[in-house]
Amino acid sequence: MSKTALITGITGQDGAYLSRFLLSKGYEVYGLLARRSTPTTWRLQHLGVLDKVHLIDGDLTDIASIVRALLACKPDEVYNLGAQSFVATSWAQPILTANATGLGALNILEAIRQVRPEAKFYQASTSEMFGKIQEPVQSERTPFYPRSPYGVAKLFAHWSTINYRESFGLFGCSGILFNHESPLRGIEFVTRKVTDAVARIKLGAPSRDGDGVQKDLHLGNIDAKRDWGFAGDYVEAMWAMLQQPEPDTYVVATGRTTTVRDMCRIAFEHVGLDYEKYVVVDPKFYRPAEVDILLGNPAKAKEKLGWEAKTTLEQLITMMVDADLERVKREIA
């Protein structure tokens, strides 16, 4: 018999890629859809799976809607990918972030405990929980030191998952995913901000803010280092965690760290441009508390799950630039 999965955050980058992956495995896929005044399903449509998934109205901050969703689809697996996930916004809206990202996970765990305790649960944790790093390479045993309201909220969700696993015997896994990107990434994230700007500058297109033709790219700390991978690879690790005999916590990363500066260089070089002529360091984009470097150790995921990243940073960035070139061409045609 095929399995049934419920995904929160199904309209996001990871939700769309995970939907496609689970459908390829023969799953029946349901998604919790928080209604907004503007359409949010474009990623599912882009991947050709919108008409293949079932959407259920609900919200992470409304436990009653989560209970109804669980009763409606009776999932074998629940993937919590929903959150207020933009780090910069978490300083401006810390309470919203805490409610959606932190308490939202607790709402799902409690709903599962009450009405679907046999379901396996995946919590999307994040490398932002390491924050001010306590070890040069971060593993499942590295102490946490979050540096943003987002990281703090994710840490609450992470420990709640472990607590429900140990207190109530729920099959709860936590994937500590390092930065993972794709052509479906939101424009507010630095990788898409860069690749979109590269496309606009190359094509002589208008900037997104409507302030004439885009001529440069304003960024904050371009010497910050991140461990970047491809979201399409990373969702496979989420699924693999829930296929193990026992629930556990796993770091999912490439094991390579790169500066924002070098990521810009790769993106601009792909279209024959010199990034130094276009990138402007703007203090406006500095964070109140910076995370200077993140570098994950994915050894446990490789050993236990048989998972490792397939896509290099160069392949990822060129894929994203090419996708944005096509988008911008259509926009200005």
Image (cartoon, helix red, strand yellow):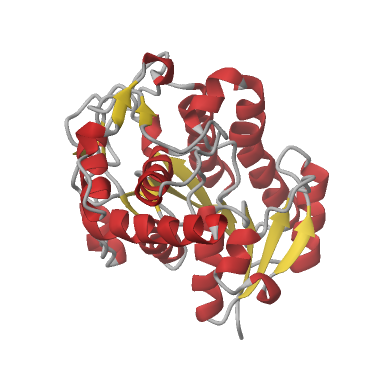
Percent across and percent down for residue 64 are 83, 45
In the drawing, does residue 318 fall left or right of residue 5?
Answer: left
Picture coordinates of residue 311 (x, y %)? 27, 62
Q: Is residue 305 above or below residue 328?
A: below
What residue is rendered at 59% in x and 40% in y? Answer: 83
Percent coordinates x, y for residue 237 in the rendering: 38, 61
Quadrant location of the C terminus in the rendered image: bottom right
Q: Residue furthest bottom?
A: 1
Closest to the observer, 257 or 327? 327
Residue 3 in view of the camera: yes
Number of numbered markers = 0
Residue beneath the point at 19% across and 28% down: 135
Residue at 51% x, 22% y: name it: 149
Name the quadrant containing residue 217. top left
Along the viewing direction, whichever of 200 and 99 lies nearer the viewer: 200
Q: Quadrant of the N terminus?
A: bottom right
Residue at point 75%, 67% (across, down): 73
Work out whether residue 204 or residue 251 is closer to the camera in this orientation and state it: 204
x and y, in percent, of residue 43 in the image:
58, 60
* Residue 77 visible in image: no
Residue 77 position by quadrant = bottom right
